[in-house]
Image (cartoon, rainbow, N blue to C red):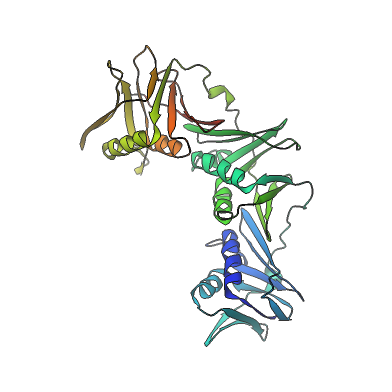
Amino acid sequence: MNLTIDREILLENLNVISRGLPSKSPMPILTGIKMEATDTDLYMTSSNSDISVEVLIEDASLQIQTPGKTVVPGRFFIDIIRKINSKRVNLYLLEEKVLVIKADRGEYKLHIMDYMDYPNIDFVTLENPLVLPSSVLKGLIKETVFATATSEKKPVLTGVNFHHSSGKLIVTATDSFRLSQKVISIPEYNDFNITIPSKSLDELLKAIDSYEEDLSLYFSMNRILVKYKNVLFQSRLLDGNFPDTSRIIPNEFPIIIQFNKDELVEAVERVSLLSPRDKEKDKEITYSIIKLSIKKDRIIEISTTNASIGDAKEELIPTDIETSNPIVIGFSSRYLLEALRSFMSTEISLNFSGEIRPFVIRGENDANLTQLILPVRMD
């Protein structure tokens, strides 16, 4: 293999490929990037237990003198290409043992890995795509993925569920203590019900961050593939039935309080500085419990009491309030802040159905986005 290519083009594609590289792996070969140069094109592939990524480089700057195949140490190769300053890079194999990287006056040699040891990556067949604007998919991920579980006790909850039926796509994430759900209409397509690992969605979001055109989604029994530009991004799906969350969302709200989102976020951030943390197995988990109450003059008080540090409280004047009932409710400030930041709206509402029942957050301009949080008993 012997080729020359513009460094910027190579680096741009390596940054995408890096999304599928494991930091460590029981299969050392997977820490490498598979490269295959044909007479005209360059394919690069990476894979870990969850994600596989392939790019096809057909750029005009690519000049292939000799086709060939190899596997190079992924992180070292990316770091070298990232640090060198030359406009063009020459890559060639030396005695089928070393990849030589020549850049201006610099020369770097990497011991290659055995190409035959690299597993065959079976990508989903590119048939019957579901086409979505990239902005829609990015929005769905940002509005839900933060609510997935981090514990592997219920593996299916570590992913985001995508359920399509009759032109309606319901995207849901929950860790059993909170829920995030977005509902959108999509073009006519086959029904599906899949759960995608949150780590895969995080990496996909980074990969398509600057991409603004349509994406094509392809499905199989246990995998989903996203195709855009010259990239194939594939993730495994999680096994198991995602729970039916529709029953936990209240239908009636006797108490509705509207706030300016930024004012509420800032107040909660300040009060939560002193909020007590729950502990699990001697490891602090940032539940940051705070309390919200309605005072007689319809001013909202947000407060916390920490026996070892001190107390904090702030008063907020809501933009509107609909209630004839008092309420005192405790909850995780972290959960509330993460939910609030998922909204584009400047005006949001907290919708309460009782002191020990889940409450719902909605945004004035965020159609069909629901955030739900379970309260904490304040006994």
Along the line of sight, which residue is nearer the eye, 164 or 135?
135
Above or below, 30 relative to 302: below
Along the line of sight, which residue is nearer the eye, 324 or 91?
324
Q: Give me the residue at 54% from left, 70% from top.
A: 78
Picture quadrant of residue 335: top left
Look at the image and tell me in which quarter the C terminus lies.
top left
Q: Position of residue 220 (x, y in %)?
A: 74, 46
Picture quadrant of residue 3: bottom right
Along the line of sight, which residue is nearer the eye, 305 or 104?
104
Q: Give me the residue at 69% from left, 37% from top.
A: 186
Q: Position of residue 81 (x, y in %)?
A: 54, 74
Q: Give me the residue at 75% from left, 74% from top.
A: 40
Look at the image and tell me in which quarter the N terminus lies.
bottom right
Q: Give me the residue at 70% from left, 63% from top.
A: 119
Residue 308 seen by the camera: no
Q: Is residue 344 left or right of residue 7?
A: left
Q: Residue furthest right?
A: 127
Above or below, 210 relative to 242: below
